[in-house]
């Protein structure tokens, strides 16, 4: 109870509320702008949090995360261009509603469903994170290795539409993570004589380069804006009758989003489509979907915002990010001297409980800001891509320099940006690379500690039940994308 009160005091302090509000406003912006999204937004804001206490820094970043998931629906509805991948399903019915002159209704449904789902996800985080962290204290090093491996293989197998590219990206991230001081022997390795690499490759430089700069380089090839949107909207309230009609759909979407958010590698990108499919299947009139059905907006929007709380649960409790964005958040925690995992609840309880309360409060602030500011975001979306790309590059390079005041970090960020740009051209996803970079230390140190404890006996990974379960799940995560197409063919009717 004491820690909850400390969290409430932190969040409802003037500076705490200011951080939540700034995070929400910036989050709506990066969410509404296609190509940006929460990962890039958080990467760009991390440098501005160095001088803050960790709890206020996390308030800013998680508020941005929550609002960005909603912001993606604004451009999805108004321009048929989802601002985030998690808003892709919203286009199916959101844009037809706009074309029918029902923009205000569509955006009102989106905001209400996003707020509902976000609150359910925040409640799930509060209820399940600490019990899971207590259970995690019983996990052996072999178990932690298997859990980290499962998170990595799941993300790799689900990223970019190509399992091979996902696994190659994860391998590249693990290779980069080996630079620095050996966690067991304490000797430098792969530093190539640069003292700047003795602490490993700076996570911030890597994520700024891979996410922000690489996307900015892509945007420079598309100098045009997204097009202007004329709006005459007032506030985005929807009536009680509409809320009553959509309530069961929002509950279903929130449940889907929370559960899938907890699973590493799934997140809002998949949850939005699962929720949309369930809403269509449960509807008494599935023929209305795709033609401007409000339930087709409510289901995916509730789901993608509910994944925020769900994805943070394994990050805090196990030190395993549930999504690419939580991998960036995990990097922010590390930069502030905190290591996510069960020990975090004892080492920094104020940070944890401030995050719990802040995520719930960010949903309320998001709703209040959202109902009054739509015309502003509609005009912001008309900004030329060239302006945005230059702004991202400048902020990214300044942020990379701010961490250690070394030009080496700036060059490193540029290098990662160029590599990321090239990889994107070949269809690679950046998520497995970053996740491997973040999880590399956990996977390697747990693996080698388990072998030291067992005196080099590899059977420890089989005799430990938790390790065995997650190793089997990791193998299935890799094999499933290969096997599933053949299963679909075998189940298809003859002659189909």
Image: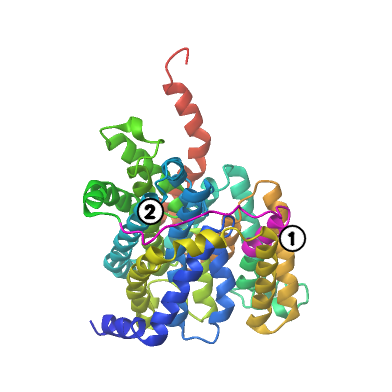
Q: Nearer the viewer, residue 137 or 202?
A: 202
Magenta stretch holds residue 222: yes
Give coordinates of residue 495: x percent, y percent. 47, 12
* Whether residue 495 is situated above or below residue 81 in the rendered picture: above
Q: Residue at x 33, y 57 (%)?
A: 112
Q: Quadrant of the N terminus?
A: bottom left
In the picture, the disc for residue 400 is: none
Give coordinates of residue 155: x percent, y percent. 51, 52
Q: Residue tagged by mark 1?
A: 418
Q: Residue at x 29, y 69 (%)?
A: 126
- Total label count? 2
Give coordinates of residue 110: x percent, y percent. 38, 53
Mark 1 and 2 residues: CB-CB less than 8 Å, in contact? no
Q: What color scheme is it?
A: rainbow
Q: Residue tagged by mark 2?
A: 110
Magenta stretch holds residue 119: no
Give the mark, 1 or 2, whose residue is nearer the N terminus: 2
Give coordinates of residue 285: x percent, y percent. 29, 32
Q: Nearer the viewer, residue 389 or 317?
A: 389
Tag 2, which secondary structure?
Answer: helix
Which image quadrant is residue 46 in?
bottom right
Rounded to the nearest angstrom, the CA distance separating label 1 from label 2 is 36 Å
Q: Residue at x 41, y 58 (%)?
A: 233
Which image quadrant is residue 341 in?
bottom left
* Whether residue 17 is situated above or below residue 221 in the rendered picture: below
Over which residues does the magenta segment extend?
210-237
Q: Nearer the viewer, residue 131 or 107?
A: 107
Q: List the single residue furthest toward the top.
A: 495
SS majority, magenta = loop
Which image quadrant is residue 21 in?
bottom left
Q: Is residue 309 visible?
A: yes
Tag 1, which secondary structure?
Answer: helix
């Amino acid at each position: 109870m004491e820690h909850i009160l400390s969290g409430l005091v932190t969040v409802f302090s003037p500076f705490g509320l200011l951080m939540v509000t700034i995070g929400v406003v910036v989050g709506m912006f990066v969410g509404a702008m296609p190509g940006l999204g929460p990962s890039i937004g958080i990467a760009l804001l991390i440098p501005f949090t160095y001088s803050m206490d960790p709890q206020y820094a996390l308030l800013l970043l998680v508020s941005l995360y929550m609002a960005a998931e909603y912001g993606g629906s604004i451009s999805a509805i108004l321009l048929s261009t989802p601002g985030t991948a998690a808003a892709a399903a919203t286009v199916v019915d959101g844009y037809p509603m706009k074309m029918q002159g029902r923009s205000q209704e569509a955006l009102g449904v989106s905001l209400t469903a996003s707020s509902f789902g976000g609150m359910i996800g925040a409640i799930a985080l509060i209820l399940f994170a600490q019990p899971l962290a207590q259970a995690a204290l019983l996990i052996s090093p072999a178990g932690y290795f298997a859990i980290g491996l499962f998170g990595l293989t799941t993300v790799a197998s689900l990223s970019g539409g190509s399992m091979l590219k996902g696994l190659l990206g994860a391998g590249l991230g693990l290779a980069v993570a080996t630079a620095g001081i050996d966690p067991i022997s304490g000797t430098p390795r792969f530093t190539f004589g640069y003292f700047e690499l003795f602490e490993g490759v700076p996570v911030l430089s890597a994520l700024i380069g891979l996410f922000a700069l690489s996307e900015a380089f892509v945007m420079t090839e598309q100098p045009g804006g997204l097009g202007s949107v004329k709006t005459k909207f007032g506030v985005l309230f929807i009536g009680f009758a509409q809320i009553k009609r959509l309530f069961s759909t929002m509950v279903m979407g929130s449940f889907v989003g929370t559960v899938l958010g907890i699973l590493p590698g799934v997140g809002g990108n998949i949850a939005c489509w699962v929720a949309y499919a369930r809403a269509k299947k449960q509807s008494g009139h599935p023929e209305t979907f795709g033609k401007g059905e409000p339930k087709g907006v409510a289901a995916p929007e509730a789901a993608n915002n509910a994944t925020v709380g769900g994805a943070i649960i394994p990050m805090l409790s196990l030190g395993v990010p549930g999504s690419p964005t939580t991998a960036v958040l995990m990097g922010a925690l590390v930069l502030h001297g905190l290591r996510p995992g069960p020990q975090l609840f004892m080492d920094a309880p104020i940070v944890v409980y401030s995050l719990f309360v802040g995520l719930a409060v960010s949903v309320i602030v998001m709703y209040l800001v959202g109902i009054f500011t739509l015309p502003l975001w509609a005009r912001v979306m008309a900004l030329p891509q060239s302006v945005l790309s230059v702004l991202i590059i400048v902020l990214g390079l300044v942020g990379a320099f701010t961490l250690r005041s070394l030009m080496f970090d700036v060059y490193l960020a540029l290098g990662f940006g160029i590599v990321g740009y090239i990889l994107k051209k070949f269809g690679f996803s950046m998520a497995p690379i970053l996740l491997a970079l973040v999880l590399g230390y956990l996977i390697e140190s747990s693996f080698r500690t388990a072998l030291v404890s067992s005196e080099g006996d590899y059977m420890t990974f089989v005799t430990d039940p938790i390790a065995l379960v997650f190793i089997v799940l990791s193998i299935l995560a890799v094999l499933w994308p290969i096997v599933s197409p053949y299963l679909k063919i075998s189940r298809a009717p003859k002659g189909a």
